[in-house]
Amino acid sequence: MSLLSVEQLSKEFGGVRAVADLQFSIPAGKVFSIIGPNGAGKTTLLNLLTGVYTPSLGRIHFADRDLTGQPPHVFAASGIGRTFQNLQVFFNMTALENVMVGRYLRESCSLTAALLRFPGLGRSEAATRAECEELLRFVGLGQYVQAESDAMPYGALKRLEIARALATKPRLLLLDEPAAGLNPTETLEVDHLISRLAASGITVVLVEHNMRLVMGVSDHILVLDYGRQLAEGTADEVRRNPRVIEAYLGSDTAAAAAQGGD
Amino acid sequence: MFGRLAASRFGGLAVLAAIVLVLPLALVNNYYYEVAILVGLNAIVCVGLNLLIGYAGQISLGHAGFFGLGAYGSAILTARYGWPPFAAMAAATLGVALLAWIVGRPILRLRGHYLAMATLGMGIIISIVIVTEDRLTGGPDGMAVPPLTLFGLALAGERLWYWIVGAGLLVAVWLALNLVDSPHGRALRALHGSEIGAEVTGIDSARHKVRVFVISAIYAALAGSLTAHYAGFITPGKVTFFHSIELVTMVVFGGMASTFGAVVGAAVLTMLPQALTLFKEYEMVVFGAVMMLTMIFMPKGLVPTLASRFAAGRP
């Protein structure tokens, strides 16, 4: 069963087709990776799948709903969460508050209730706080609960964004290069985290350059090149695909690389 | 001790209430009362404006316009049409809220300089309308405003108004503190931190921006209306671009994203020109210098800077 599907998805920026004619579907409960050389359109695709960009052409269906042309907060409300390659942390808030923002969608608090501080609000705030502390511990940031986010190390901020996205209770979580800039230990932790997310029933879309990570955790891989769909399949299928090798290494070395494995 | 008190949820409010209660002991004559009332009225506007600028990170250079519309709305409805003052105040505030909602929807799509220019333009248009519609507003000469009445009794006198404005300020601060410390307040601060981050986290940025713009306009309009009834006379002087700049300077100087900072900023920068009456012509220069020095030496503003100093100094 597919959770998200796109048809003929295209995005042009002033005549440049960053993403062209994509057609694929993401099955529920799997880890789906999107790879490709720099400039292949991976981040553009994520921006399309979260409503940050409106497609020039094509449609996006999520859980039997057509989300094409909706603003990002509607994508989020439908159950799509994401992180960013270049961090979009709320640096004016603590780590815990960052995650609590993610609960906004799932809380019902009217403006009047907030302004007049209705009695129920204190209780629901305490519950939100407890849940979000739990989420921080889940992503391995237990020691940063009270930390100001602008004082946290880079690797922790990457996971803070994951915790914030999880707070929205997503069915689909899009991770844009979660391991970029991380050391091998931190990368391993991200690896484990992704496996745990998938095990908890969240469908994960992973955009990543670290091939060891991608090949290890992915159930399904989509390869992009110049905004087009180059290949699609399991890790093994993609690894052996000569077009993929050519795109990554160039045609001269493709034959040699195909013999040498990854 | 003060720092820790001010940091807790109601500690700051309690300190402010205590100051409002004790202050009359230091107010030796009516002039001091007048200054204190002026501080309170400006502080109400700044607390609202700080929700917009300090918390949500959206600039407005036109809030004197909302202040003026609140004042003139009240004045015109009572003086020209014989409305009861409280009804006029409510109607003027509601009208300003509606205007802010209508204007806010398109202009809050703009960011940074463009938003500043759009709000600036809005403020100037309001100012021009008030000056030129002289049959209604008295034009540049201003107009007299009937006093506030309650059960047929006119509310007049500095001492009484001190308590009215003091209570108004406490309510204004209480509401602002509640809003900030709620899911809605977090949404506003998230917008300030990263608009795109907030959007993909499920926050409808357009809706929240318009809402906080309307709330801040209501604060300004109510303060404007109170000012008109208190002073008994209003002129377009309070609706000028310069007054908008004064208000923004108070917020920035006192401390962005600090409700008490807004109150302190309003207090200091309302009293400063009173102390410098000899240099009346240089008032704009003084405000400009305060703005520049704040941005250079304490970009977070007075209260947050002091608070972090206290926090760092404590063992």
Image: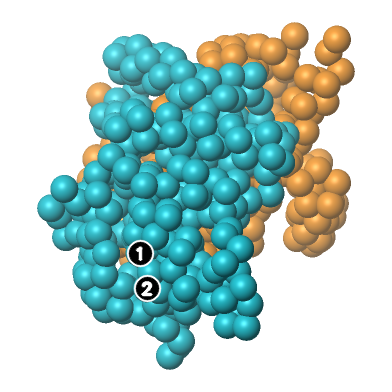
User: Which image quarter is the C terminus of chain A in?
Assistant: bottom right
Outermost residue on the left side: it is: A64
Q: Residue at 57% across / 24% down in the picture?
A: A140
- Residue B167 visible in this rendered orientation of the protein: no
Q: Are marks 1 and 2 in contact (CB under 8 Å)?
A: yes
Residue A123, by quadrant, is: top left
* Amino acid type at image mark 2: Gln
The letter of the cyan chain is A
Given residues B28 and A129, the one toward you in this image is A129
In the image, residue B88 lies at what x, y percent? 28, 45
In the image, residue B204 lies at what x, y percent? 34, 50
Given residues B208 and B50, the one toward you in this image is B208
Rendered view: A210 above or below B131: above
Rendered view: A145 above or below B134: above
User: Which residue is denoted by mark 2 in the rendering?
Assistant: A229
Q: Residue at 30% across / 32% down in the picture?
A: A201
Rendered view: B276 above or below B238: above
Q: Which mark is residue A232?
A: 1
Helix, strand or loop under label 2: strand
- Residue A91 visible in this rendered orientation of the protein: yes
Relative side of A179 to A217, left or right: right
Callout 2: chain: A
Q: Colour of chain B?
A: orange
* Amino acid type at image mark 1: Glu
Q: Residue at 49% across / 44% down in the picture?
A: A216
In the image, residue B211 lies at what x, y percent? 35, 47
Relative side of A4 to B181, left or right: left
Helix, strand or loop under label 1: strand
Q: Closer to us: mark 1 or mark 2? A: 1
